[in-house]
Amino acid sequence: MNPIETLPQGTFSEFLKSEPVMGTAVDKFKIALYGDNGSQLGWLGQNDDEWAILVTDESKALTLELYPYDQVDYYRVKGTSRYMSVNRNAYIGFYNWSGATGWKLDGEHLISDYNNQKLSLYSKDNQYLYAWDKYNVLNVKLDTK
């Protein structure tokens, strides 16, 4: 497609805030998190400020939906327009479409397309989840039950 042949529709601001038309979610699941010794640490959840955290109570785990778009996999919080994303400091949070970043599931590791780093945990006390290989890289299992 040659850009000069297609005029933009709407405002740039509207373009940034609108979600792509993707149809329905492919799968719905919770992300179970495991240490490198194979023991389950908990699930992916969020705090009140919409940052991703480790939760030990399954009822507090987020249900996510897989949304493939333009050959990239995005993870959206079910029933919302917030996507699992990475900020410039490697924290994982849930942003609207204009801040969404993609992910790759490689075996048992979830890797951010933003910084090419794996889902990790600094410590159980800290609870925040990161995309940062130097921390404790977590194994993940998508729990569809």
Image: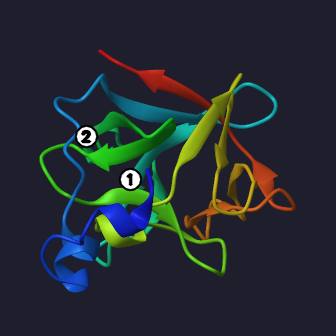
Which is nearer the eye, 89 or 46? 89
- Residue at 66%, 81% (x, y): give it: 89
**Residue 40 screen position, x and y as percent:** 60, 31
**Residue 118 screen position, x and y as percent:** 73, 49
- Residue at 68%, 58% (x, y): give it: 121
**Which circle marks residue 59 in the picture?**
2
Which is nearer the eye, 18 or 62? 18
Which is nearer the eye, 138 or 56? 138
Q: Closer to the observer: label 1 or label 2?
A: 1
For disc 1, the marked residue is 45
**Residue 7 screen position, x and y as percent:** 24, 70
For the residues labelled 1 and 2, the Cα–Cα distance comes to: 9 Å
- Residue at 51%, 35% (x, y): give it: 71
**Which circle marks residue 82 in the picture?**
none
Q: Residues within 10 Å of mark 1 (few under 14, many from 20)?
A: many
- Side (left or right) of 72 relative to 80: right
Q: Residues within 10 Å of mark 2 (few under 14, many from 20)?
A: few
User: Toward which corner of the image does residue 33 lie, by quadrant?
Assistant: top right
Q: Is residue 94 visible?
A: no
Mark before the other along the chain sequence, 1 or 2: 1
- Side (left or right) of 121 relative to 44: right
Q: Amino acid at mark 2?
A: Ser
Query: If the image is split into quadrants, where does the C terminus sit?
Result: top left
Is label 1 in a helix, a strand or a loop?
strand
